[in-house]
Structures are given as C-alpha cells and as structure tokens.
C-alpha cells in the first residue's frame, strides 16, 4: 500500500507565501492558493495531498493505493 504525503490545511495557511508556493508549486499566486485552501477547509476538508492522487478520503487525506509491482 502506497500513500501520498499530505499537509494539514491549517498548517499550510500558517506558512509564509514563499513556503506555501514551494509546497503547492501551482501557477496560481499565493493569495489565490490561500483562498482555495480556505474554501476546501470550509467545505469540510482538513488535508491537502501533494501529488497526483486519485484516491482520497472525504477529509482530503490519501486513502492509499495498492501497488501491483510487489513493492510495499
Ligand atoms: Zn494518493
């Protein structure tokens, strides 16, 4: 089972714009990213997964991925 790493949205909102930009690495500006994070939090999500995750729990955490290659 493999898991994507995730960040608590509250923690991300506490970070500086520079730290936030390094983690999210989105083309949007930090203010925009913060607005989106607040929207996610308001809708009940607590975590933000980093990376290309297609399996998430309702709170935003990675629900895990089964691997077929035999590793982990
Ligand atoms: Zn995942």
Image (cartoon, rainbow, N blue to C red):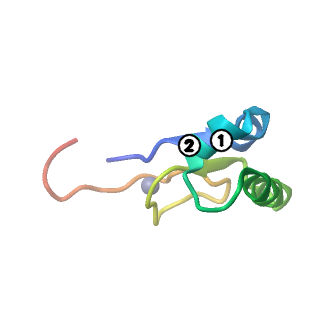
Asked which quadrant contains residue 8, the reply is top right
Query: Which sits in the foreground, 50 or 33?
Result: 33
- Residue under label 1: 20
Residue at 82% across, 57% down: 35
Residue at 24% across, 55% down: 67
Query: Which sits in the foreground, 61 or 27?
Result: 27
Residue at 13% across, 55% down: 69
Q: Which mark is residue 55?
A: none
Q: Which mark is residue 23?
A: 2
Image coordinates of residue 13 in percent, x first then y, are 77, 40
How many numbered dots are placed on residues in this image? 2
Looking at this rendering, what residue extends furthest in the left direction? 70
Image coordinates of residue 27 in percent, x first then y, are 59, 62
- How far is the residue under mark 2 from the one under mark 1? 5 Å
Callout 1: SS: helix
Taking the image as four quarters, which one is ligand 1 found in? bottom left
Residue at 46% across, 66% down: 54
Q: Is residue 6 above or below residue 25?
A: above
Image coordinates of residue 22 in percent, x first then y, are 56, 41
Image coordinates of residue 47 in percent, x first then y, are 65, 47
In this rendering, position of residue 7 left or right of residue 32: left
């Amino acid at each position: 089972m493999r898991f994507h790493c995730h960040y608590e949205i509250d923690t991300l909102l506490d970070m500086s714009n520079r730290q936030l930009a390094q983690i999210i690495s989105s083309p949007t500006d930090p203010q925009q990213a913060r607005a989106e994070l607040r929207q996610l939090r308001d809708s009940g999500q607590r975590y933000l997964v980093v990376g290309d995750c297609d399996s998430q729990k309702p709170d935003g955490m990675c629900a895990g991925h089964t691997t077929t290659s035999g590793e982990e």
